[in-house]
Amino acid sequence: MTDLPANTRGGGDGMPVVALVEPVEQELREAPVAPAMPKPFTGTLLLTAGIILATANFMAVLDTTIANVSVPHIAGGLAVSPSEGTWTITSYSVAEAITVPLTGWLSSRFGSVKVFVTAMALFGLFSALCGLAPSLGVLVFFRVCQGLSGGPMIPLSQALLLRIFPREKAGQAIGLWSMTTLVAPIAGPLLGGIICDNIGWPWVFYINVPMAAVCAFFAWRILKPQETPLMPRSLDMVGLGLLVIWVGCMQIMLDKGKEMDWFESPVIICLALVAVIGFVAFMIWEFTDSNPVVDLKVYRHRGFSTASVVMVLAFGAFFAANVLSPLWLQTNLLYTATTAGQSAAFGGILAIFMSPIVGRLVGKYDPRAMITFGMAWMAAMMIWRSTFALNIDFGHLILPNILQGFALPFFFIPLMTLGTGSLPPAEIANGAALISFVRTTAGAFGTSIVTTTWDNSATASRVSILNQPGSMVQGAMDAFQGAGLSAGQALEQYETLVQSQSVMLATDHIFLAIAVVLALAGASVWIAPRPKRVVAPGAGGH
């Protein structure tokens, strides 16, 4: 297995990200008297524990993408629109992001192994309940619970891997963890499509149950000797409450806005006001509290602030495009979930091969130039996708997806280097966790914005097509009738054609808008100063 740099890993979208290491590990090292570390595992025990931890990480990351191609099936099964069906994606992402700042506190209060095993068991339980959900509201609630459970599994699986592996084999631990994180988002759409087409959408969630049960059982039996000492510390309940309020209200507003006619609805107005007030109160509290749940003081560093802004723009746009593409393929081109999943899976192939190469290059070249190159390449691929037409074949469909994978590491690895490279060592762990929160939240917000804009653009395109001169409409009707259709059949065929073309135009408009956002992100990175150092492997907590 190829070792990846210890400061890189893969994100839930198939992109490498800086390793998130449990903040409590850093606190243990900085304590005046640190308990002796237990001996690392060896032999079969090390292999078994490594597989368990890697599998847990695989499951948590898999669920960020496995539902992407399942949205039309879920929407049809629960009698809701496809845009409403995307709530199953955004709710999981937001909940997962919220738990990231809590992982360190939970571990210090209860122990890393206990938190990890409990999170995995709850992840399996809520996965089963997701499959049993009788309505969209119930499904979204259990997806939130599933995200809250899955969030700690990602950083804790890495922290425990580094704990059980001998220090000289830390690179192998990160390599194992990174490869599962890269493979999971690629396997997600493909696996989700096969399951939906052959078994049914509930099994997208049921598949987690036996894996979680087995992993939780053996993790508890094997990892107990590696439990971290308890170092209870107070939890910023006010900051946590404000975080949940403003993020939750913002996400609900974005998801329900179109349905409720946006600011014509008093409910949307109230949600917007609460989100804004909650955000301002959260910022004030976190900047002034002595023990904040999210330490925002890292934003005093211009490099980190710039990296966060670029992350919001670029990842929000990129993730939304990955959700939109299979949705469009299934609802407009009538692809099966399996075929839509196959088209999405191709996007991560080159990313896997390029990640270790870019990891070696990032210390030799200006990361800002690498980010701009990656963003420009990705923007070009989005412009290419904005030229798609209804008659596109599968080969031409996946080609920009494949080539896009080449640019992903050039964007993400240098961006994390730019952000964390501007931080002092004591703030790297917090900065990495915070930028992960920003990344995941941006993906959820971006998905809601893009799917709403897509619906609005399709409606506007439909109106534009229907307002064409009557001679053009009549010409189309005559052509259909000339092919042997009755007047009623010709009108129905014309309506179908107008709807398909309006959705196609809307999809092209969205891809073009995403290209503009990516280009803007690539240009914005030059606001940051060039980092003076590259975060060394294992930095950020180990």
Image (cartoon, helix red, strand yellow):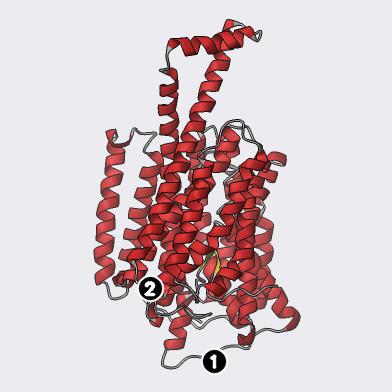
Q: Residues within 10 Å of mark 1 (few under 14, many from 20)?
A: few
Q: Residue at x 41, y 44 (%)?
A: 449
Q: Residue at x 50, y 76 (%)?
A: 364
Q: Residue at x 26, y 69 (%)?
A: 287
Give residue 14's quadrant in the image. bottom right
Mark drawn on residue 36 = 1
Give residue 231's quadrant in the image. bottom left
Q: Residue at x 48, y 80 (%)?
A: 541
Q: Nearer the viewer, mark 1 or mark 2?
A: 2
Q: Is residue 478 left or right of residue 91?
A: right
Mark drawn on residue 530 = 2
Q: Nearer the viewer, residue 479 or 304?
A: 479
Q: Is residue 501 left or right of residue 285?
A: right
- Residue 331 seen anywhere in this rendered image of the structure: yes
Above or below — where is 353 with respect to 320? below
Indicate the amino acid at tag 1: Ala
